[in-house]
Amino acid sequence: MRLPRLRGRQGDAARRLDLAALALEDGDPRKALDLAGSALREARRGGAESEVLEALLLRAASLFELERFAEARKEAAQACEADPENPAAWFERAEAAYRCADFEEALSAVRTAVDLDPEDPEAWSLLGRVALWMDDAAAAELGGRAPIIDRRWLGGRFGAATLATLLSTGSLMSCFALLPFWLENAHGASAAVAGVAFLPIGAGIALTSRRSGRLGDAGRTAETTAAGMLIAACGFLGTALADDWPERIVLFQRNHENVCGSLGALREEIRRTVLHEVGHHFGMDEHELPY
């Protein structure tokens, strides 16, 4: 999702676009969709091409947030037609096509986005993810051009994002009293300190969790790959390890950073996986969970 840069502008369409962008930023995609729709109609009547493009992109981003991916894809395709040289339009189209499981269109669109803006880390990250589904190992390695976290750090910005996420969840996390911090050092030993677990893992390391994402069923062992195939590697461990240990959430740094092209996306991925596992703790099944 790309948020347009807010500007102080005149005119009904422009004001609605600014309000739509603010609504989307504030987590209200339905309001953003309505505002962008009315701005689009006004911009088309007035022949304002730049505002038409911005409205289409805002509508695509809003629909994406509402998980109406097929509709988001159509809006993004219109944005590409309106301005074929706009990398944000191609990125939105690629991201929506990816979520619609049309990996050929997603790959074509994200390659165009990268060609138009080779400095965009989110586009490189998406290219790597799409290439995984296309079984293109060479192209998948290109996702490494978008590192947002130094893997040599145990925790680093990943740790800061995780702690901020846990603090922001408020009452949900208070049910756990104090989550222990488990730091996995280079020798495989663990030490308990206050905080959250940071377990950076490399290629070919097997792990077992109650949630193995796309690569396995609950309780089975999943193996990571160099390109980070384990999309949802958040293990909710504790009682299975020892009866007297409190339950804990283990977030695997490498797996999270491999599916996130920006620090903002990383924070959201952490938030969703934490809430997912908290839901499991209280007995919710997969189909009952919001994430």
Image (tube, helix red, strand yellow):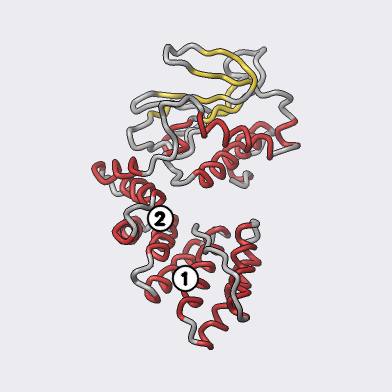
Amino acid beneath label 2: Tyr
Q: Could you say where residue 119 lies in the image, as x and y percent from the top left?
A: 35, 52
Q: Is residue 71 above or below residue 98?
A: below
Asked whether the beta carbons under mark 1 and mark 2 sit within 8 Å of each other, the answer is: no
- Which mark is nearer the camera, 1 or 2? 1
Mark number, residue 131 = none
Q: Secondary structure at mark 1?
A: helix
Q: Nearer the viewer, residue 271 or 276?
A: 271
Measuring 52% from the left and 64% from the top, which residue is drawn there? 4
How far from the left and from the top, in percent, is residue 26?
Answer: 65, 57
Q: Which residue is mark 1?
A: 75
Residue that appears at 66% across and 24% down: 179
Q: Is residue 204 above or below residue 290?
A: above
Q: Amino acid at mark 1?
A: Glu
**Quick check: can you spot residue 276?**
yes
Q: Is residue 109 above or below residue 44?
A: above
The residue wearing badge 2 is: 98
Which quadrant holds residue 242?
Answer: top right
Residue lying at the far front in this picture: please name it: 8
Residue 36 lies in quadrant: bottom right
Of 62 and 287, nearer the camera is 62
**Label 2's element?**
helix
In the displayed structure, would residue 223 be above or below residue 142?
Answer: above
Residue 38 visible? The answer is no
Q: CA distance from mark 1 to mark 2?
A: 15 Å
Which quarter of the figure is the C terminus placed in?
top right
- Is disc 2 surrounded by few (<14), some (14 to 19) or many (20+) residues within 10 Å? many
Residue shown at 34% from the left, 50% from the top: 127
